[in-house]
């Protein structure tokens, strides 16, 4: 289904270290937003780093082209910072695909920062989307905030996924709030329909789906589970996800002999998330920091009551009657879970708590088509902005700090000179332009295959040589 364009068709390049086959909120955002922008008539490609043997150019559903660029992975799926080494290949891709706007995602992504720097050296329009919250006191936060300030000093517009995230980003990067928009994440609600018959009526099931890392509050989970199991004999837990803190959950289960009450699923594929959620009555999120939690939206769409820590942008995500909040402390998490258990028992007498009502409300609140339309408005806003002179770019970088400002000016100057050298060695005219994906032909093939899939078996003639089988 196509949608009317609010601006001329644009060639957009999404860049991030975080994309499929890795799983997460950023990966989901990139894929779904790109698909909807393609449906609205734009050309969208994605640049990410290689994943194992997955290198080179690949097409995925809907004609979305993905460039898997070889890179060294250093930590948590982020690539090794090189500053200038990616410029030649990024420049080739930008020119081949005739890119108008480069859209980087996630402050932790090296590819994002480097692509935005190179794009500005080439005079392209740039947008940045921040998906996380960062502090101001720890060493990693201070360093990353300074890097973010460098990158966003010369970006045309920034997008955040919640108002809390916007405040955080504006403070971290010293941005003009008018240059930052709030566009939340979304889900495909039809893929998260309730199934009351999937749950076990003999139990009140609490589902946890999360990366098992410190930032997701796994310490709180480990402390709360034994207390809940002791206080509520009918409660059991289903925990999906993997990570370095899985061993903590396994040790807790062994120590308290809760093997029959705590089920560990390990890593859960995206296609299996709904089948896990519909087994539960309550979804528990114990994150210590979160800009926008897609998991609680998916859980509410499946009809689960949500219990979550009140951190970051989470209070903005769901209506109050769908979620019970807790301070990120053990006792408060236990109290919130006990309150939710009581609400499960009373659910039949409250129509507003019916799973079908939860699903219909979430479907009205969140859609990727709306996200794509609002993103398109940002693109339209910056598409015709005049390119500032090089000295203006240096002025912005110089204002990033007494020492850092001079260093950033040096980096930008070197990158610009490398761009000049590349333009001399490989002029634009000598770089072959890529052919656009034929969406009309693709749609015809998809429609034909659907007809064949739905046709009755009797409509196909069996060849004579197969009669004996």
Image (cartoon, helix red, strand yellow):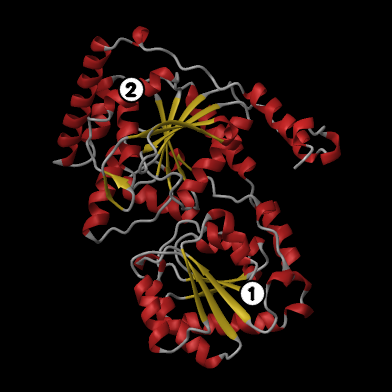
Residue 205 screen position, x and y as percent: 60, 78
Q: Position of residue 144 (x, y in %)?
A: 27, 49
Q: Is residue 342 left or right of residue 226?
A: right
Give residue 127's position: percent from left, percent from top. Answer: 43, 34
Residue occupying image coordinates x 43% and y 67%: 287
Which comes before the other along the chain, label 1 or label 2? 2
Mark pair 1, 2: CA separation = 50 Å
53 left or right of 420? Answer: right
Q: Residue 113 sits in which quadrant?
A: top left
- Looking at the image, the residue that sits furthest to the top is 429
Determine which of the numbered discs, if any, sits on residue 91 in the image.
2
Question: What label sits on residue 211 in the rendered view?
Answer: none
* Placement of 387 over or under 64, stated as above or below: above
Give the x, y percent position of residue 426. Answer: 28, 12
Q: Quadrant of the N terminus?
A: top right
Q: Quadrant of the C terminus?
A: top right
The structure residue drawn at horizontal position 35% and vertical position 46%, both measured from the top left corner, is 107
Q: What residue appears at the point 42 percent right and 75 percent down from the top-left corner?
A: 328
| Residue holding disc 1 | 281
Quadrant of res 394: top left
Do the CB atoms of the residues marked 1 and 2 lie less than 8 Å apart? Answer: no
**Callout 1: helix, strand or loop?**
loop
Q: Residue at x 39, y 38 (%)?
A: 54
Circle 1 crowding by C-alpha within 10 Å: few under 14, some 14–19, many from 20? many
Q: Compared with residue 145, is residue 228 higher up or lower down, i.e. above or below?
A: below
Residue in front for this viewpoint, 321 or 210: 210
Q: Closest to the observer: 88 or 443?
A: 443
Does the image show residue 258? yes
């Amino acid at each position: 289904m196509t949608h009317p364009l609010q601006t001329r068709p644009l060639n957009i390049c999404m860049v991030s270290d975080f994309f499929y086959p890795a799983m997460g909120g950023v990966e989901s955002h990139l894929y779904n937003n790109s698909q909807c922008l393609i449906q609205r008539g734009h050309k969208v490609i994605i640049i990410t780093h290689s994943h194992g043997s997955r290198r080179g150019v690949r097409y995925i559903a809907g004609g979305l082209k993905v460039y898997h660029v070889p890179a060294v992975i250093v930590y948590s799926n982020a690539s090794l910072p090189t500053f200038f080494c990616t410029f030649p290949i990024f420049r080739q891709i930008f020119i081949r695909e005739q890119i108008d706007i480069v859209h980087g995602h996630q402050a932790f992504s090296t590819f994002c920062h480097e692509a935005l720097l190179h794009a500005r050296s080439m005079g392209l329009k740039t947008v940045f989307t921040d998906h996380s919250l960062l502090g101001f006191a720890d060493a990693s936060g201070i360093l990353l905030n300074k890097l973010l300030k460098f990158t966003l000093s010369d970006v045309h517009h920034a997008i955040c996924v919640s108002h809390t995230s916007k405040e955080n980003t504006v403070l971290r990067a010293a941005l003009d709030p008018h240059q930052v928009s709030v566009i939340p994440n979304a889900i495909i609600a039809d893929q998260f329909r309730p199934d009351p018959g999937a749950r076990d009526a003999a139990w009140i099931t609490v589902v946890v789906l999360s990366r098992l890392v410190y930032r997701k509050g796994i310490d709180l989970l480990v402390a709360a589970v034994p207390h809940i199991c002791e206080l509520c004999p009918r409660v059991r837990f289903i925990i999906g996800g993997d990570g370095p803190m899985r061993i903590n959950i396994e040790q807790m289960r062994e120590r308290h002999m809760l093997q029959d009450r705590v089920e560990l699923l390990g890593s859960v594929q995206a296609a299996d998330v709904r089948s896990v959620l519909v087994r539960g009555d309550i979804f528990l999120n114990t994150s210590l920091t979160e800009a926008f939690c897609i998991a609680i939206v998916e859980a509410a769409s499946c009809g689960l009551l949500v219990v979550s820590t009140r951190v970051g942008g989470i209070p903005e995500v769901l209506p109050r009657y769908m979620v019970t909040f807790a301070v990120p402390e053990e006792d408060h998490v236990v109290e919130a879970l006990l309150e939710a258990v009581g609400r499960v028992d009373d659910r039949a007498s409250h129509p507003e708590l019916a799973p079908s009502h939860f699903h219909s409300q979430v479907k009205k609140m969140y859609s990727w088509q709306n996200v794509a339309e609002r993103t398109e408005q940002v693109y339209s806003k910056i598409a015709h902005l005049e390119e500032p002179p090089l000295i203006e770019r240096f002025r912005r970088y110089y204002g990033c700090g007494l020492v850092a400002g001079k260093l950033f000016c040096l980096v930008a100057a070197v990158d610009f000179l490398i761009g000049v050298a590349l333009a001399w060695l490989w002029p634009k005219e000598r770089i072959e332009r890529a052919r656009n994906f034929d969406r009309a032909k693709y749609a015809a093939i998809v429609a034909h295959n659907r007809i064949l899939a739905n046709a009755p078996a009797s409509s196909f003639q069996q060849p004579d040589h197969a009669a004996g089988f």
